[in-house]
Image (spheres, rainbow, N blue to C red):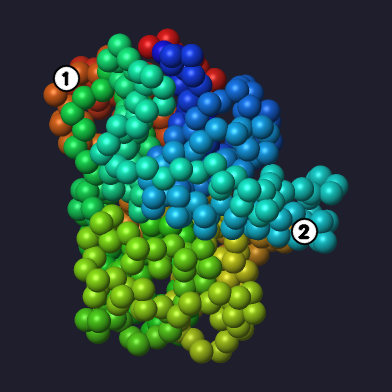
């Protein structure tokens, strides 16, 4: 068994791991690199492994940093099955074509306005190419072993991060096993059910997004309510850049609670992301993945006005009906409709730009939350006068304390733990905490690192 790290090394994006076992090549996750330019350029580089030689792809969940490179992998020759949970498949049907569409739009905008250094600017893959890759997906049940070969099996277990998110446990014929955490959810998430308690693995690939931080203990419902009330009182708009899957639904839940209890004024709320709208509707189909009752689910899904078309999206910003709340993708303000809302409101001193999740190094969200006074959008620089707020208590990732509690369920020590999916500072902190508490051997792999297991 050999493991090669092709992404999410000393960064939170681009998750890709290649496992070679029993003569088969298995890729676990296949995500896009996001954030800094040097990372994004890796999306355009040739993979160190021939995609056509990969037998199988196993997917922990649908977020772009875990699934967003799949259309490119297929475009480059991969033809094996993509195994995942049913909810992950349903989300990928939404996310991947949308990703291709956004990339086509961004390339077209860059070409029309001439702000790209590439002539012409091209998408990494198109919407049609993203739809093409979906034919290789195969949904499987959680909790049951599924064969990859005569003596090679994998099992999915609930990770509690977003709809369909799973841990992947792989076992070889000699009994050696490896567990990929993907993204670990939080035990007390008000929407998602808690992660499964895992008890054993010879090797563990563990995320560390918040390996150096504890989440704020403040109630996010109260925090959002305070921000909405404050912004509305001065006649402003709250713009919430949001991840379309997971975070948008959590925000809608908190706004539903606030509105139903009369804790915020009765102002318009817009969900301006077709992808987030479609993902929200999936709450009804996958009731077993979350904590909401059918009645709560219906109420959460109806708290906001949905804007599907571009014309409807533009009408929000050009409307004089203030104050209001706009939830729009993307969560790190790297692309999508939220950029148009930012251009409209980021210079308005009455308004608030509310970030509610992790901001990868170098993204617009990262730069705004660090206090930059001018931001570049679509080739132009825009002064920042709106209030910038970043809530640290809404993450769907476990913090280091919650990860340590999750690790306490292991009945035997893993031979090695590999820390990934975290900036280097967070990964190093997670490594030190695990070594101190459990005395396990912990490694932080570099990009391209190979480990014989």
Q: Which mark is residue 412?
A: 1
Badge 1, how many Cα within 10 Å: few under 14, some, many 20+?
Answer: few
Q: Residue at x 46, y 21 (%)?
A: 19
Residue extending farthest front: 150
Q: Which mark is residue 113?
A: none
* Position of 24 relative to 227 (above/below): above
Q: CA distance from mark 2 to mark 1?
A: 54 Å
Query: In the rendered image, is residue 351 in sight?
Result: no
Picture layout, residue 288 above or below residue 423: below
Compare residues 371 and 273 and report the one nearer the observer.
273
Residue at image point 25% right, 81% down: 260
Quadrant where the N terminus is found in the figure: top left
Percent position of residue 82, x then y: 49, 38
Q: Is residue 142 left or right of residue 87?
A: left
Q: Is residue 385 left or right of residue 148?
A: right
The residue singled out by tag 2 in the image is 108
Q: Residue visible at 56% across and 52% down?
A: 96
């Amino acid at each position: 068994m050999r493991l090669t790290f092709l992404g999410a090394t000393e960064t939170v994006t681009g998750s890709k791991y290649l496992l070679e076992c029993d003569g088969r090549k298995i890729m676990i996750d296949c995500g896009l690199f996001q954030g800094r330019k040097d990372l994004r350029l890796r999306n355009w580089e040739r993979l160190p492994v021939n995609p056509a030689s990969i037998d199988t792809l196993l997917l922990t969940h649908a977020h772009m940093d875990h699934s967003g490179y799949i259309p490119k992998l297929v475009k480059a020759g991969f033809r094996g099955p993509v195994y995942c949970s049913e909810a992950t498949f349903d989300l990928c049907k939404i996310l991947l074509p949308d990703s291709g569409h956004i990339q086509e739009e961004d390339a077209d905008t860059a070409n029309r306005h001439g702000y790209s250094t590439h002539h012409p600017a091209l998408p990494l893959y198109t919407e049609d190419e993203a739809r093409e890759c979906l034919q290789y997906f195969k949904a499987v049940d959680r909790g049951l072993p599924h064969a990859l070969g005569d003596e090679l099996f994998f099992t999915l277990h609930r990770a509690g991060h977003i709809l369909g998110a799973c841990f992947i446990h792989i076992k070889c014929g000699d009994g050696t096993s490896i567990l990929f955490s993907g993204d670990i959810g939080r035990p007390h998430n008000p929407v998602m059910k808690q992660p499964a308690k895992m008890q054993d693995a010879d090797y563990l690939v563990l995320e560390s997004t918040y390996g150096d931080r504890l989440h704020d203990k403040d109630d996010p419902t109260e925090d959002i309510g305070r921000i909405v009330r404050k912004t509305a009182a001065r006649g402003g708009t709250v713009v919430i850049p949001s991840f379309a899957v997971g975070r948008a639904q959590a925000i809608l839940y908190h706004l539903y609670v606030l509105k139903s209890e009369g804790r915020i004024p009765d102002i318009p709320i817009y969900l301006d992301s077709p992808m987030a709208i479609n993902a929200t509707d999936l709450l009804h189909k996958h009731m077993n993945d979350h904590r909401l009752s059918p009645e709560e689910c219906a109420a959460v899904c109806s708290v906001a006005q949905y804007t599907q078309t571009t014309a409807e999206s533009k009408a929000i910003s050009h409307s004089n009906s203030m104050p209001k709340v706009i939830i729009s993708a993307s969560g790190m303000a790297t692309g999508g409709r939220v950029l148009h809302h930012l251009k409209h409101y980021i210079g308005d001193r009455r308004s608030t730009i509310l970030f509610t999740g992790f901001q990868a190094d170098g993204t617009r969200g990262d730069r705004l939350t660090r206090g930059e006074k001018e931001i570049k959008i679509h080739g132009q620089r825009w002064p920042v006068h709106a209030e910038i707020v970043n809530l640290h208590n809404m993450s769907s990732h476990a913090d280091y304390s919650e990860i340590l509690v999750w690790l306490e369920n292991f009945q035997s020590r893993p031979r090695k733990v590999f820390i990934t999916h975290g900036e280097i500072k967070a990964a190093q902190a997670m490594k030190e905490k695990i070594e101190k508490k459990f005395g396990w051997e912990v490694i932080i792999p570099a990009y391209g690192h190979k480990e014989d297991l």
